[in-house]
Amino acid sequence: MLATPGRLPFGIVLQGALYGTTTGLLGIGLVLTYRSDRIVNFSYGAMGGVGGFYLATTLGFAKKATGSYQAGFLGFAVLALVALAALAILKSHWRARWPQFAGAQAATVRV
């Protein structure tokens, strides 16, 4: 069983763990971005914020319009499939444009 200080409800502990994990991962991403190009790039954290904002907003609109979150989740599933198809198409164009990189392994970046 999870040891909670002062018998905090499990939901509060779980919420704290999720917020802490998210903050830690964003910090790690910021450090890795900085180490790769030596520029502090705060747009890294903004990308996650924009995605979270649009998901929550769209689900709220779907709930208000239909009474269920199902339409919002379906919309984001369709959007994900469209993005996957676009990446597959772009991949073939990229390989045709730069054939020397088609079978190449990822380059190792030393910092």
Image (spheres, grey):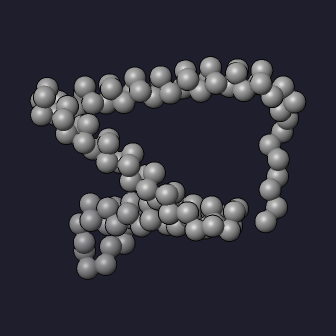
Q: Viewed as shown, does residue 110 lie left or right of 23?
A: right
Residue at coordinates 83% horizontally, 32% vertically from top-left?
A: 101
Residue 32 spot, x, y in % from top left: 64, 63
Residue at coordinates 55% horizontally, 21% vertically from top-left?
A: 85
Q: Viewed as shown, does residue 108 lie left or right of 50?
A: right
Residue 17 spot, x, y in % from top left: 39, 64
Can residue 17 be seen at all in this image of the molecule? yes
Instruction: Establish if 71 lies above or below 4.
Output: above
Residue 67 spot, x, y in % from top left: 12, 29
Q: Quadrant location of the C terminus?
A: bottom right
Instruction: Establish if 55 lies above or below 96.
Output: below
Residue at coordinates 82% horizontally, 61% vertically from top-left?
A: 110
Quadrant of the rendered image containing residue 41: bottom right
Residue at coordinates 34% horizontally, 61% vertically from top-left?
A: 14
Q: Viewed as shown, does residue 44 lie left or right of 108?
A: left
Quadrant of the rendered image containing residue 23: bottom left
Instruction: Establish if 42 lies above or below 75.
Output: below
Can residue 21 be seen at all in this image of the molecule? no
**19, 26: nearer the viewer:** 26
**73, 32: nearer the viewer:** 32
Total label count? 0
Q: Quadrant location of the N terminus?
A: bottom left
Instruction: Establish if 40 lies above or below 52.
Output: below
